[in-house]
Amino acid sequence: MPRVLVLDPISQDGLDLLDAAPGIEYEIRTKLAGEDLRQALAEFDGAVCRSGVKITAESMAGNKRLKAIVRAGVGTDNIDKNAATRAGIVVMNTPTGNTISTAEHAFTLMLALSRNVAAANQSLIEGRWDRKEYMGAQLAGKTLGVVGVGRIGVEVAKRAQAFQMKVIGFDPFLTAERAAELHIEKADSVEDLLKQIDYLTVHTPGGTETKDLISMESLEIIKPGARLINCARGGIYNEAALVAGLKSGKLAGVALDVFEEEPCTNSPLFGMPGVTCTPHLGASTEEAQTQVAIEACQLLVNYLTTGEIRHAVNVASIDPKTLASMRGFINAAYRLGLLLAQWHGGAFSSCTLNYRGEVTQKDTKLLTSAFCAGLLEKALDDEANIVNAEVLLRERGAKLVAQSQSEMGAFTSSMTVEVSGDGKTHTAGVTLFGNNMPRLIRLNDYRLESYLDGFLAVFTHDDVPGIIGRVGTALGRHSVNIAQMAVGRAGESPGGKAIGVLNLDSMPPQEALDEMVAEPGVNSVQVIELPPAGQEPPWLQ
C-alpha cells in the first residue's frame, strides 16, 4: 500500500483528498531536518511539502523507496532536483494554484506604495495625524512595466488595465501577436522598458538569468520617480541598488515580498521612507493554500495509483525502454532548441519541425518536447523541461507544427526546424552519428557538418580565399583555441556567400569578435553556447 508523508502544514482539503483515496496511507511529520528527514523519507513512497522543509541531496541519500515529491506551490528551490533525478524521484509542482493570489498581492503592494498606506497607518499608531506627509500618486494614467509575461504577469497586467494604466511587457518569448491580444505594448529589452515606466513588477524565476535585473547600472537609465515591486524571487533586484536609488531620489518607492535570504528580519531597506515590505505573503491566502494542497495531493495520488506524471520539473514522463532507444536524438533535439533560441535571438510566432527518415518511426512528440525545452531554457517565466515545454511555448502564442517524411534524405535520420517571429525566419537541422553524437547539418541555406557542443563561433562571409585563416589568426591573438571547424556554402558554386562554424575551447572575448567581424569579407559573427560534449539536459540525466 503506497504511503505518503506530509512534511509541511497544508490545507485540510488536501488531507481530506488523501483520506478519500483508496489504498493510500499518509502521515504528517513537520519540522523535520537532517538525519530525521532522511530516515523519514526512506519510509514513504511519496511526499508533499511546501517551502518550510529543505529536501537536500543528503535528505535523499540512499533512498530506494521514495518515488515522488510534490511541492504545494510553484517554486521548487527547496528541493534538490538534480539529486532527486539521480535518485529516480519525480519532482512535481502546482503552477496554477496561487496565480491569482500572487497577482493580487503584487497589486496590493503597488497600491500601498502609491498611497503610503503602511507609513500612514504607523503614524496613527504613534499618535500623529500627518495628512500632508503622505501625499500619494494615483495609478490611472501611469505606465506599468511587467517583466515576465507568464500566468502571473498576465493577471497583473489585466488588473493594471482595469485601473486605466498603460502596460509595457518584456518577455523574451512574448510575440507581437500575443502582446496585441493582451493589449500590452511589447518592449524589446529590459533597458528599453525601464526608460518608460512609472512602476515595475517582475514575475520571473530566480537564478543567474534574472539576478540583479535591477542594478546600479539600471539606475542610470530608469525613469526618475519609478516605483518597484517584487513578489517573485529575492535577488532579482539588487538590494544595494535599491537603497542607493531611494537615497538619491531616483526611485520613489520599493515594495518587496521576497528576499534573497529568507527568513529576512534585517535589511537596510526596512524603515526607509518609501519602502513597504511583507514576509513572503504572495501565496498566503486561504484560497491559494486550499487550491495548491488539493492539486498537490491529487498529483501524488494519481502518480502512485496510475503512474501519471503532470507538472514534473525534473524528468520526462516516458518509460525506460523508450528513453533508452531515443536518448541520443532527444539530446540532439534539445541542443537544436538551444541553438535556434540564440541564432534567432527574438520572440517566436511559429515553429515548424520536420522529421525525415528512420526517426519518423519513433515517438517524435518526445523530440518536439525536447526541442521546445531547449528553445525555452533561457525564458524568464517557467522552468522548461520535456514535460511542460510545448505547453509553455503555446501559452506564449507561438504556433507549433510537426511534420514527418519517412523517405530518407542525405542522412538516415534528420530533424530540421524553422522558427519565425519579429519579422525574421531562421532554420537549422541536426542528425545523430552513432548513438550519442549530435551533429549540426544545416544553418539557414547553408549545408555543413559541425559538432553541436561547447562554444560555437558562427560567422557568415564571402566565399573567397584567406578569410578562414585571418579569422583563426584573430582568435589566436587572444589565446582562443579552435577545436573543430566546419564550413558550408549556400549553393554549389564558389564565390558566393558562405558560413563557418568554429568549435572553441573557451568563450572568446569581445575584442576577438570585434577583430573577426572587422576582417574584409566577414559579414557577421555570433557566439552560441551549448552544453559540453556528452552532457545531457538535467531532466534527461
Image: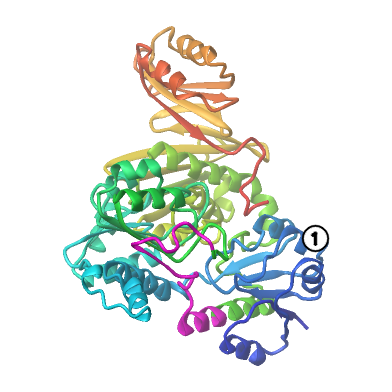
Q: For the view shown, which residue lies furthest in the left direction?
A: 141
Closer-to-camera residue (200/24)? 200
Compared across the picture, whether 40 is left or right of 268 comes to: right
Q: For the view shown, which residue lies furthest in the front direction?
A: 127
User: At 61% across and 80% down in the image, what residue appears?
Assistant: 297
Pinpoint residue 366: horizontal percent, then vertical percent: 56, 56
Q: Is residue 286 magenta?
A: yes
Write down the residue under mark 1.
61
**In the image, residue 155 above or below residue 416:** below
Pinpoint residue 47: horizontal percent, then vertical percent: 69, 74
User: At 42% across and 71% down in the image, what residue appears?
Assistant: 102
Pinpoint residue 337: horizontal percent, then vertical percent: 49, 45
Closer-to-camera residue (340/351)? 340
**In the image, residue 438 above or below residue 111:** above
User: At 55% across and 83% down in the image, what residue appears?
Assistant: 294
Pinpoint residue 359: horizontal percent, then vertical percent: 57, 47
Displayed quadrant of residue 271: bottom left
Q: For the view shown, which residue lies furthest in the top direction?
A: 466
Closer-to-camera residue (494/379)? 379
User: Which portion, as a residue range, is magenta?
Assistant: 266-294
Q: Is residue 218 magenta?
A: no
Q: Amino acid at mark 1?
A: Ala
User: At 64% across and 45% down in the image, what residue appears?
Assistant: 536
Element on which disc 1 rests: loop
